[in-house]
Image (cartoon, rainbow, N blue to C red):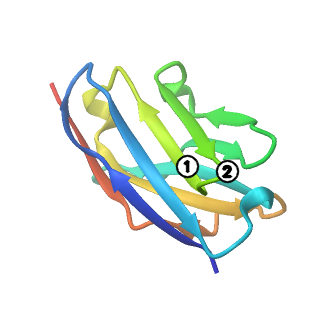
Amino acid sequence: QVQLLQSGGGLVQAGGSLRLSCAASGRTFSRYYMGWFRQAPGKEREFVAGSSWSAGNTYYTDSVKGRFTISRDGAKNMVYLQMNSLKPEDTAVYFCAAKLATDQEYKYFGQGTQVTVSS
């Protein structure tokens, strides 16, 4: 079982920055992909960014490329999402997520944290 505990988020003006953090525990994470998802009101949850834990490959949805950065600290089992140049359409509940590299979909999710971007 993997436990993911998120922190960060909040209210920020358009153009501002926020950093989300996710602490992972319960497993050896070298084989896990870590990611971030978000769900806006009335919309389905969508993939935002992902990273292989050991290889360092990163992936982003088109709408956040160049603005968001996913990173991880293997020594601390931490994953981060640095969000810059935030837009009102980035407003959503953000979820940290984890899966094995062999899994089709992300299996484990954090509790979610609200990010609100005002115009």
Q: Where residue 104 appears, x then y in whole percent?
A: 76, 61
Apparent side of residue 23 relative to residue 16 in the rendered image (left or right):
right
| Residue 74: assigned label | 2
Apparent side of residue 13 relative to residue 48 in the rendered image (left or right):
left
Q: Nearer the viewer, residue 22 or 91?
A: 22
Extreme residue in the bottom direction: 1
| Residue 23: assigned label | none
Q: Residues within 10 Å of mark 1 (few under 14, many from 20)?
A: many
- Which of disc 2 and disc 1 is earlier in sequence? 2
8 lies above or below 68: below
Which residue carries the number 1 mark? 79
Apparent side of residue 73 relative to residue 64 in the rendered image (left or right):
right
Extreme residue in the right direction: 102
How far is the residue under mark 1 from the one under mark 2? 8 Å
Disc 1 is placed on an element classified as strand
Quarter of the picture holding the N terminus: bottom right
60 lies above or below 15: below
Apparent side of residue 65 relative to residue 89 in the rendered image (left or right):
right
Mark 1 touching mark 2, by CB under 8 A?
A: no
Residue 52 seen from this side = yes
108 lies above or below 54: below
> Residue shown at 63%/61% (left/top)?
98
> Residue shown at 84%/62% (left/top)?
102
> Which amino acid, mark 2?
Gly
Q: Where residue 54 appears, x then y in whole percent?
A: 79, 47
